[in-house]
Image: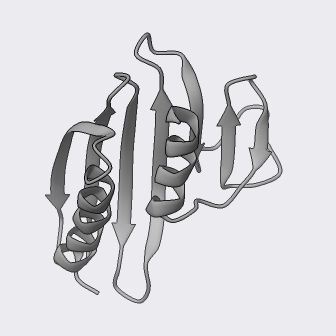
Amino acid sequence: MLLTEYLSNLVKVIEEYSKTELIIDSELTTDFRTEKIGIIKGSITFTDNSRLFFTEYLDLRYKVEKLNYSFHYQKQDGTLIFRYDNARHKPPIDAFGHKHSSNGKIIVAELPPLNSIFAEIMDFLL
């Protein structure tokens, strides 16, 4: 898969959820190092002015591999609602992929597909 294909799929998911009229703004930037390696960053603003910020450093040479990622959803005032990421922690946690919740807990969690993240956000909004 090429990065342009991956980006196209990402845009389709965003456009599909934009039809709910719960998204009021979105922004995407790309930094393609090659046709199969690069960075995609974005932010999406919802009707309550909560925002999803995300970054994915991708290597698509052999499979879809997310070398680094962060999907950070926050209230308008910057208060964390949830974040999925694979950043290393000190002290270390048991898993590379994990989820931070608004209560400060960190749980083991693989990154769900973007449409599942949007479903989680829609549950929060509605």
The image quadrant of residue 47 is: top left
Residue displayed at 78% across by 30% down: 105
Whether residue 92 is visible here, answered yes or no, is: no
Tell me: residue 67, above or below residue 94: below
**Color style of the picture:** one colour
The image quadrant of residue 90 is: top right
Tell me: residue 9, above or below residue 48: below
Residue displayed at 20% across by 72% down: 8
Foreground residue, 100 or 44? 44
Residue 111 at x, y percent in the picture: 58, 59
- Give the side of residue 99 with respect to residue 2, left or right: right
Residue displayed at 39% across by 37% down: 52
Whether residue 26 is visible here, answered yes or no, is: yes
Residue displayed at 22% across by 82% down: 2
- Give the side of residue 80 with respect to residue 46, left or right: right
Residue 74 at x, y percent in the picture: 48, 26
Q: Given the current orientation, which residue lies at the most extreme top position? A: 77
Q: Quadrant of the N terminus?
A: bottom left
Residue 11 at x, y percent in the picture: 23, 63
Picture mark count? 0
Foreground residue, 40 or 20? 20
- Give the side of residue 48 with respect to residue 83, left or right: left
